[in-house]
Image: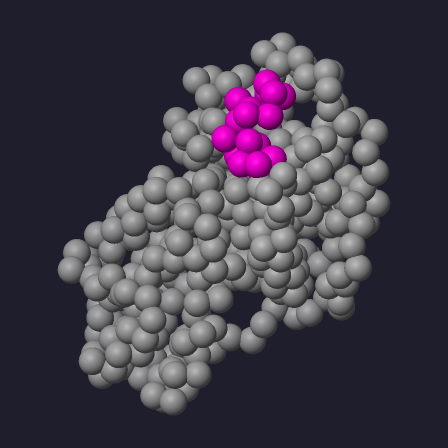
């Protein structure tokens, strides 16, 4: 973050859309895997940008950070979209015939014959990263040129991206397909790929005039962010660190009062298919780093299943506290534990960061509503020293 802060201004604004290849990433920060797990928080990154540049100069970089928060907030207001994605993914995987299976395999292994697409598929598998513009091109080609189910493409990304985020990934694919904003889709253009890859690629066989996808699914009304139990410092408490938030020391908790600290890793819950070892390893190291920073070098790593309740009970705790867990695999896992926690009279308390509670109320429609509020949010969150 410190290294890239001098480039978060006009340099980023003018160069951010260029995918120059995996060896030339100086035009982007590549902080997303760390922000995704809050090893570095959105607030820290925006502060760094505004410390090095004026608000006008840093506008584009700051907006991109708020985009990530917008996606997460939007999905919190419409949790059925995450459920529908999983349902559609599982149905699409189950219904693949032999021809479709071969087509999906060829796409994931980079053997379609579309040079740029194949290069990005290999880069994703090898590095766990793709430039944001390449992600849009890739998704568009997957959907409109190769005519493959968008949910399987989104699953491919989530299994391999180090920064794979349920909200950004699911809604990004839906946006490309024309489902997020009805009738507005992203059709990759050969000239655009050529321009923004500095002529590395010249695809000439893309479906550039495709119509947006349609669906019968209706996300329904915008819901308030779900209720969650607040932290009660008077109760005997244990701390749970998840791979959704690996900076527990900034949650405003007195960590010295915790009876025990444990981590839980849900990397493999991203998909019913095998998840990249790179993703699993990154999550493991992130959680290890988090426990080291809170002085819990011997923190327990919880296996999956019933162990959450057993661990809290052994510590004689009546409350488990964790950072707010948004929609996604970790939330799904926690939801399965709630009945047994209730039976054991153990409360799951969540701490929501001020950043999220400030931004999410505006993440109910398109991004413009959040974008318009950014100057106000910068002031409210006191992001300029």
Residue drawn 74% across the image and 55% down it: 365
Residue 176 drawn at (x, y percent) = 71, 40
Indicate left or right for 252 with 183 as reference: left
Q: Toward which corner of the image does residue 59 lie, by quadrant?
A: top right
Q: Visible in this render: residue 54?
A: no
The quadrant the N terminus occupies is top left
Q: Nearer the viewer, residue 246 or 49?
A: 246
Residue drawn 61% across the image and 68% down it: 225
Examine the structure image and report whether residue 110 is included in the region drawn in magenta: yes
Residue 383 drawn at (x, y percent) = 52, 46
Region of the chain picked out in magenta, as a range: 102-120
Indicate left or right for 6 with 152 as reference: left
Examine the structure image and report whether residue 158 is included in the region drawn in magenta: no
Q: Main secondary structure of the magenta part?
A: helix
The image shows residue 297, relative to residue 26, as above or below, that is below
Residue drawn 54% across the image and 17% down it: 20
Residue 224 drawn at (x, y percent) = 66, 70
Residue drawn 28% across the image and 46% down it: 285
Residue 362 drawn at (x, y percent) = 68, 57
Q: Nearer the viewer, residue 309 or 111?
A: 111
Q: Nearer the viewer, residue 22 or 87?
A: 87
Residue farthest to the left, as pictured = 298
Way the structure is coloured: one colour
């Amino acid at each position: 973050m410190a290294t890239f802060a001098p480039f978060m201004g006009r340099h980023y604004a003018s160069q951010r859309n260029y995918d120059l290849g995996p060896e030339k990433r100086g035009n982007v920060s590549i902080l997303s895997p760390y922000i995704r797990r809050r090893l570095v928080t959105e607030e820290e990154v925006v502060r760094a940008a505004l410390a090095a540049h004026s608000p006008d100069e840093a506008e584009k970089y700051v907006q991109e950070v708020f985009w990530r928060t917008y996606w997460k907030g939007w999905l919190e207001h419409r949790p059925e979209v995450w459920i529908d994605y999983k349902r559609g993914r599982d149905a699409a995987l189950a219904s693949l015939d032999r021809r479709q299976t071969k087509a999906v395999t060829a796409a994931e292994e980079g053997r379609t014959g579309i040079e740029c697409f194949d290069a990005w598929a290999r880069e994703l598998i090898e590095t766990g990263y793709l430039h944001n513009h390449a992600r849009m091109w890739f998704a568009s080609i997957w959907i409109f040129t190769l005519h493959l189910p968008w949910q399987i493409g989104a699953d491919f990304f989530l299994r391999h991206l180090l920064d794979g985020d349920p909200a950004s990934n699911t809604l990004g694919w839906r946006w490309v397909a024309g489902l997020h904003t009805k009738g507005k889709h992203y059709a990759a253009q050969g000239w655009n790929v050529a321009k923004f890859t500095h002529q590395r690629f010249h695809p000439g066989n893309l479906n550039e005039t495709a119509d947006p996808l349609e669906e019968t699914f209706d996300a329904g009304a915008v819901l308030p962010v779900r209720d969650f139990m607040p932290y009660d410092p008077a109760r005997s408490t244990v701390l749970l660190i998840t791979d959704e938030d690996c900076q527990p020391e900034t949650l405003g908790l007195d960590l010295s009062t915790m009876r025990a600290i444990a981590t839980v890793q849900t990397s493999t819950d991203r998909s019913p298919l095998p998840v990249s070892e790179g993703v699993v390893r990154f999550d493991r190291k992130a959680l290890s780093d988090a426990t080291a920073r809170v002085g819990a070098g011997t923190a327990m790593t919880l296996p999956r299943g019933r162990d959450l309740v057993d661990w809290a009970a052994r510590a004689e705790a009546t409350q488990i506290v964790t950072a707010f867990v948004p929609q996604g695999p970790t939330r799904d896992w926690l939801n399965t534990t709630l009945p047994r926690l209730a039976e054991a009279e153990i409360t799951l308390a969540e701490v929501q960061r001020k950043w999220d509670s400030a931004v999410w109320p505006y993440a109910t429609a398109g991004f413009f509503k959040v974008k318009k509020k950014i100057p106000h949010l910068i002031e409210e969150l006191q992001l300029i020293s």
